[in-house]
Amino acid sequence: RCCECLRCCGRREPRPRSVWLGHPEKRDQRYPRNVINNQKYNFFTFLPGVLFNQFKYFFNLYFLLLACSQFVVEMRLGALYTYWVPLGFVLAVTVIREAAEELRCYMRDKEVNSQIYSKLTARGTVKVKSSNIQVGDLIIVEKNQRVPADMIFLRTSEKNGSCFLRTDQLDGETDWKLRLPVTCTQRLPTASDLLQIRSYVYAEEPNIDIHNFVGTFTREDSDPPVNESLSIENTLWASTVIASGTVVGVVLYTGRELRSVMNTSNPRSKIGLFDLEVNCLTKILFGALVVVSLVMVALQHFAGRWYLQIIRFLLLFSNIIPISLRVNLDMGKIVYSWVIRRDSKIPGTVVRSSTIPEQLGRISYLLTDKTGTLTQNEMVFKRLHLGTVAYGLDSMDEVQSHIFSIYTQQAQDPPAVKGLSLATKVRRSMSSRVHEAVKAIALCHNVTPVYESNGVTDQAEAERHYEDSCRVYQASSPDEVALVQWTESVGLTLVGRDQSSVQLRSPGGHILNFTILQIFPFTYESKRMGIIVRDESTGEITFYMKGADVVMAGIVQYNDWLEEECGNMAREGLRVLVVAKKSLTEEQYQDFEVSF
């Protein structure tokens, strides 16, 4: 039945598709234009739609019937303009206001549809408007530029082989999302080589799920043919913004088939609670008018054309429901919207709908979560607890001294510990525990250090020498950045990372190299993330994991302090992470890798 309705409405049933890279003409079905339209009306439906939305409420319908009754000679109580001028003024204000909002909406849509992007073609790179992008086009999107359509991520200019997205306009989350290109296309020497290979993407039918994607990438001209599975990590959804590097993607969905459009409800005319209350009061007052009119006619013993007398009494008492109230409401909303836009305490505020600004004044309760909404995603590392000892903001210098002592001892290569005093052994044992904790925090994350030119040192030189003043941390969460910034403050600095390795710098300036063997990214289902690394200097393989205390409590080795301390920190309003490690032998890891 749904399919029949789609055919009747002129829309086809969504189907999976095969999209050839750089060849939009090789399509097996018709696709919608890549046009964004958020307007409520078009040229023909504007006036009927506005009038219908006005007169579907009793308050406005009452005054319309009142004005129309004056065309009947037996009911006329005065000049026509005394009824029609106020009603016409109210309608004129409403029409002008709706027209202004539609015009602003049209201009916003036009700005989005007219944005210029670079498209890879056989003739080179050409400029194309967002509205002219087609399924199969290879589009180049620069840093801080909006993604114009739903695409598969093919290449990035970042040396670490990944990029970050800002998705706050899509899902409301301010955290950055890590995205990975298709491995086969990222290995090509240049972006123009994408047009030289014979490859296509098989993608699922359009749907509203922004957190999942099913598809495959196939290259036919290699021997043997390359088949690579695609997931949400390989996607660039429309309305997201590229936060790092320059990316190249192939367009999969356009227009009304975009994930962001399918998740957006049709624009509608909004009415506030105050208007609904006035409408309800109007009905009550009208009921009182009818009762009073009936009483007046009853006092005349329903003589003559009494039904006509009832209508005349209704008209005589109609001032009990003043039309000036409607005028004052509309003018008040317009002035209130203007004042909100001009308020110096909230600069940049945009009033999207001038029909409900007074709703802001009716807010009694604000329900939020306790994380990003209240903290504004500005995270600070405040406490480290190791079971027998805890370090707060006032004792972080002790953590720093432990880290310095560990690497100072390694550099000096001291003699055997046999003759050392008990106090020295305890001190070294504690330093080792602190060092292992800081190293775990410095390695178990998805943060990427990026080097930018600061006007004195260029980007290439800053990256080569790990220049501190040019380094910026990019991550999918402010929690991750806060952790890495803390490890830097105590002496262990993250200076480099790509898809297969991590580089840390010790307090003495020595670079520690680690190979990434496996990454298990954070998901909302698992509430944890993990990473397996190999220390290049010792060959040791270590599995680090961090996550929410409620999940990690059942994973780590049992102890009698974890649950209590996590509860104490949570009661202080701190976000709590549990970090754990497990040393693996080469045989253990190889067995796992084969099974995995």
Image (spheres, rainbow, N blue to C red):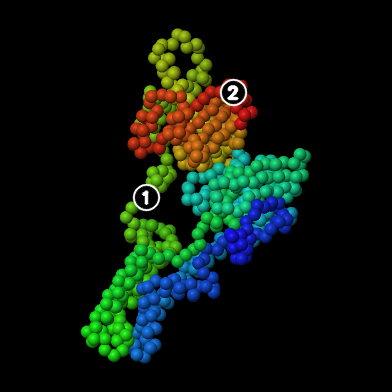
Which label number is shown at residue 418? none
Does residue 397 sit above or below 81 in this rendering? above
Q: Which of marks 2 and 1 precedes in the sequence?
A: 1
Left/right of residue 181 with respect to residue 434 in the rendered view: right
Disc tally is 2
Instruction: Name the residue located 68 percent from the left edge and 48 percent from the top edge.
Output: 201
Instruction: Name the residue located 50 percent from the left edge and 50 percent from the top edge.
Output: 171
Q: Which image quarter: residue 327?
A: bottom left
Q: Quick one: 384 or 525, which is closer to the camera? A: 525
Residue 416 image point, x, y percent = 50, 11
Q: Quadrant of the N terminus?
A: bottom right
Left/right of residue 174 with respect to residue 128 in the rendered view: left
Q: Which image quarter: residue 321?
A: bottom left
The reply to whether discs 1 and 2 touch (Cβ–Cβ < 8 Å) is no
Does residue 236 sit above or below 574 in this rendering? below
Residue 94 image point, x, y percent = 42, 73
Residue 141 image point, x, y percent = 61, 51
Instruction: Decide if residue 20 is in sight here.
Output: yes
Q: Quick one: 557 or 34, which is closer to the camera? A: 557
Instruction: Name the residue located 43 percent from the left edge and 33 percent from the top edge.
Output: 549
Furthest residue in direction top, as rendered: 419
Query: Could you tell me the amino acid type at mark 1?
Result: Leu
Which label number is shown at residue 588? 2
User: Distance from label 1 to label 2 (Cα)?
Assistant: 48 Å
As helix, strand or loop, the secondary structure at mark 1 comes to loop
Which label number is shown at residue 367? 1
Residue density around tag 2, few if under 14, some if 14–19, many if 20 or more, within 10 Å: few
Instruction: Decide if residue 148 is in sight here.
Output: no
Query: Could you tell me the amino acid type at mark 2?
Result: Gln
Q: Quick one: 392 or 353, which is closer to the camera? A: 353
As helix, strand or loop, the secondary structure at mark 2 comes to helix
